[in-house]
Amino acid sequence: MVSDYLSVVCRRYMGVLRAEWRVHATAFDDLKLIADSMDWLCNKENCLEWSKEKSFHGPIMNTGLVKINRKKVALECLKNLGSEVHRAILADGLERRIDGDKNLHIRISLPMLVKGEIKLAKSGNIEASVKGIFKIESYPGSHPKDIATELIEGMI
Protein backbone atom coordinates (compact mmCIF):
# COMPACT_ATOMS: atom_id res chain seq x y z
CA MET A 1 0.00 0.00 0.00
CA VAL A 2 2.73 2.45 0.90
CA SER A 3 4.64 1.61 -2.28
CA ASP A 4 1.46 2.27 -4.34
CA TYR A 5 1.08 5.65 -2.65
CA LEU A 6 4.73 6.55 -3.29
CA SER A 7 4.41 5.42 -6.89
CA VAL A 8 1.44 7.74 -7.46
CA VAL A 9 3.07 10.68 -5.66
CA CYS A 10 6.40 10.26 -7.50
CA ARG A 11 4.73 9.87 -10.91
CA ARG A 12 2.63 12.97 -10.34
CA TYR A 13 5.70 15.17 -9.79
CA MET A 14 8.10 13.53 -12.22
CA GLY A 15 8.90 15.18 -15.48
CA VAL A 16 11.98 16.53 -17.15
CA LEU A 17 15.25 17.10 -15.29
CA ARG A 18 17.06 19.12 -17.96
CA ALA A 19 17.05 19.87 -21.66
CA GLU A 20 19.56 20.58 -24.39
CA TRP A 21 19.14 21.91 -27.93
CA ARG A 22 21.87 21.67 -30.57
CA VAL A 23 21.93 23.23 -34.02
CA HIS A 24 24.58 23.21 -36.76
CA ALA A 25 24.93 26.09 -39.19
CA THR A 26 27.29 27.06 -41.99
CA ALA A 27 28.96 30.40 -42.56
CA PHE A 28 26.14 31.23 -45.01
CA ASP A 29 23.35 30.81 -42.43
CA ASP A 30 21.91 33.76 -40.54
CA LEU A 31 23.15 33.02 -37.01
CA LYS A 32 21.20 35.93 -35.49
CA LEU A 33 17.93 34.63 -36.96
CA ILE A 34 18.64 31.13 -35.65
CA ALA A 35 19.55 32.51 -32.21
CA ASP A 36 16.36 34.61 -32.09
CA SER A 37 14.33 31.53 -33.04
CA MET A 38 15.93 29.50 -30.26
CA ASP A 39 15.26 32.32 -27.77
CA TRP A 40 11.60 32.21 -28.84
CA LEU A 41 11.45 28.42 -28.50
CA CYS A 42 13.04 28.40 -25.05
CA ASN A 43 11.38 31.58 -23.72
CA LYS A 44 14.81 32.76 -22.69
CA GLU A 45 16.98 35.56 -24.08
CA ASN A 46 20.49 34.90 -25.35
CA CYS A 47 20.24 31.21 -24.54
CA LEU A 48 22.20 29.97 -27.58
CA GLU A 49 25.98 29.83 -27.34
CA TRP A 50 27.91 29.45 -30.59
CA SER A 51 31.19 27.65 -31.11
CA LYS A 52 33.15 27.33 -34.35
CA GLU A 53 34.57 24.03 -35.50
CA LYS A 54 36.23 22.84 -38.65
CA SER A 55 34.01 20.34 -40.45
CA PHE A 56 35.20 17.03 -41.86
CA HIS A 57 35.31 18.55 -45.35
CA GLY A 58 37.17 21.71 -44.30
CA PRO A 59 34.76 24.66 -44.02
CA ILE A 60 34.06 26.19 -40.63
CA MET A 61 30.79 25.05 -39.03
CA ASN A 62 28.97 26.90 -36.28
CA THR A 63 27.45 24.80 -33.54
CA GLY A 64 24.83 26.39 -31.33
CA LEU A 65 24.08 24.89 -27.94
CA VAL A 66 21.35 25.67 -25.42
CA LYS A 67 21.61 23.99 -22.01
CA ILE A 68 18.66 24.22 -19.67
CA ASN A 69 19.44 22.82 -16.24
CA ARG A 70 16.34 23.97 -14.36
CA LYS A 71 13.45 21.48 -14.30
CA LYS A 72 10.69 24.07 -14.64
CA VAL A 73 12.34 25.83 -17.60
CA ALA A 74 13.10 22.49 -19.31
CA LEU A 75 9.49 21.41 -18.86
CA GLU A 76 8.24 24.72 -20.31
CA CYS A 77 10.55 24.25 -23.28
CA LEU A 78 9.02 20.83 -23.96
CA LYS A 79 5.55 22.33 -23.57
CA ASN A 80 6.41 25.10 -26.07
CA LEU A 81 6.64 22.52 -28.86
CA GLY A 82 2.85 22.62 -29.07
CA SER A 83 0.08 20.05 -29.13
CA GLU A 84 0.53 19.25 -32.84
CA VAL A 85 4.14 18.20 -32.24
CA HIS A 86 3.17 16.36 -29.05
CA ARG A 87 0.56 14.35 -30.96
CA ALA A 88 3.09 13.58 -33.69
CA ILE A 89 5.64 12.39 -31.12
CA LEU A 90 3.09 10.07 -29.51
CA ALA A 91 1.88 8.78 -32.88
CA ASP A 92 5.45 8.19 -34.00
CA GLY A 93 6.13 6.04 -30.93
CA LEU A 94 8.17 7.02 -27.92
CA GLU A 95 10.04 3.71 -27.75
CA ARG A 96 12.43 4.71 -30.51
CA ARG A 97 12.91 8.23 -29.11
CA ILE A 98 14.04 7.25 -25.60
CA ASP A 99 17.55 5.90 -25.17
CA GLY A 100 19.04 3.76 -22.39
CA ASP A 101 20.04 6.85 -20.41
CA LYS A 102 16.38 7.99 -20.16
CA ASN A 103 16.82 10.78 -22.70
CA LEU A 104 13.96 11.75 -25.02
CA HIS A 105 15.33 12.75 -28.45
CA ILE A 106 13.41 15.15 -30.67
CA ARG A 107 14.40 16.77 -33.96
CA ILE A 108 12.52 19.80 -35.21
CA SER A 109 12.81 21.46 -38.60
CA LEU A 110 15.16 24.47 -38.59
CA PRO A 111 13.60 26.12 -41.69
CA MET A 112 10.16 25.95 -40.07
CA LEU A 113 11.48 27.18 -36.71
CA VAL A 114 12.95 30.35 -38.21
CA LYS A 115 9.53 30.95 -39.81
CA GLY A 116 7.94 30.79 -36.36
CA GLU A 117 6.45 27.30 -36.69
CA ILE A 118 7.45 24.14 -34.90
CA LYS A 119 7.32 20.91 -36.88
CA LEU A 120 9.08 17.61 -36.36
CA ALA A 121 11.86 16.97 -38.83
CA LYS A 122 10.96 14.09 -41.10
CA SER A 123 12.95 10.91 -40.62
CA GLY A 124 15.41 10.34 -43.44
CA ASN A 125 15.05 13.90 -44.69
CA ILE A 126 18.24 15.90 -45.21
CA GLU A 127 16.80 19.27 -44.16
CA ALA A 128 18.54 21.22 -41.42
CA SER A 129 17.21 20.42 -37.97
CA VAL A 130 17.54 21.32 -34.33
CA LYS A 131 18.14 18.37 -32.05
CA GLY A 132 16.55 18.38 -28.61
CA ILE A 133 17.41 16.07 -25.77
CA PHE A 134 15.20 15.97 -22.69
CA LYS A 135 16.32 14.00 -19.62
CA ILE A 136 13.27 12.15 -18.27
CA GLU A 137 12.98 12.07 -14.50
CA SER A 138 12.43 8.43 -13.65
CA TYR A 139 13.42 6.29 -10.71
CA PRO A 140 13.65 2.53 -10.08
CA GLY A 141 10.29 0.90 -10.57
CA SER A 142 9.11 3.45 -13.11
CA HIS A 143 9.61 3.33 -16.86
CA PRO A 144 10.80 6.41 -18.78
CA LYS A 145 8.41 5.67 -21.66
CA ASP A 146 5.39 5.65 -19.33
CA ILE A 147 6.48 8.89 -17.67
CA ALA A 148 7.16 10.59 -21.01
CA THR A 149 3.81 9.41 -22.41
CA GLU A 150 1.92 10.67 -19.38
CA LEU A 151 3.82 13.96 -19.44
CA ILE A 152 3.25 14.65 -23.15
CA GLU A 153 -0.41 13.56 -23.03
CA GLY A 154 -0.88 16.05 -20.18
CA MET A 155 0.45 18.84 -22.40
CA ILE A 156 -2.02 18.24 -25.23
Image (tube, rainbow, N blue to C red):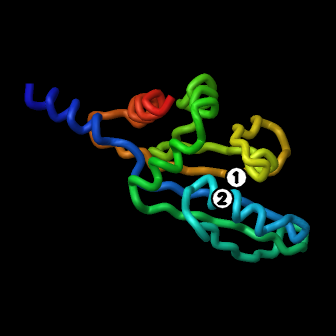
Residue 149: which quarter of the image?
top left
Q: How crowded is mark 1: few (under 14 residues within 10 Å), some or many (20 or more)?
A: many
Q: Considering the image in quadrants, where does the N terminus appear? A: top left
Q: Name the residue under label 1.
A: 130
Does residue 27 lie above or below 36 as drawn?
Answer: below
Which residue occupies 57% across, 37% down?
97
Which residue occupies 16% across, 27% down?
4
Residue sitting nearer the eye, 145 or 91: 91
Q: Do the residues labelled 2 and 1 touch (CB within 8 Å)?
A: yes
Q: How far apart are marks 2 and 1 (CA)?
A: 9 Å
Residue 139: which quarter of the image?
top left
Residue 103 at what x, y percent from top left?
Answer: 49, 46
Q: In this view, does 110 lie to the left or right of 40?
A: right
Residue 126 at what x, y percent from top left?
Answer: 85, 44
Q: Mark 2 points at which residue?
A: 38
Residue 132 at what x, y percent from top left?
Answer: 60, 50
| Secondary element at image label 1 | strand
Residue 94: which quarter of the image?
top right
Which residue occupies 29% across, 41% down?
13
| Secondary element at image label 2 | helix
Q: In this view, does 26 lie to the left or right of 156?
A: right
Does residue 146 lie above or below 130 as drawn?
Answer: above
Amino acid on which disc 2 is placed: Met
Residue sitting nearer the eye, 1 or 19: 19
Residue 71 at what x, y percent from top left?
Answer: 39, 54
Does residue 152 lie above or below 56 as drawn?
Answer: above
Q: Nearer the viewer, mark 2 or mark 1?
A: 2
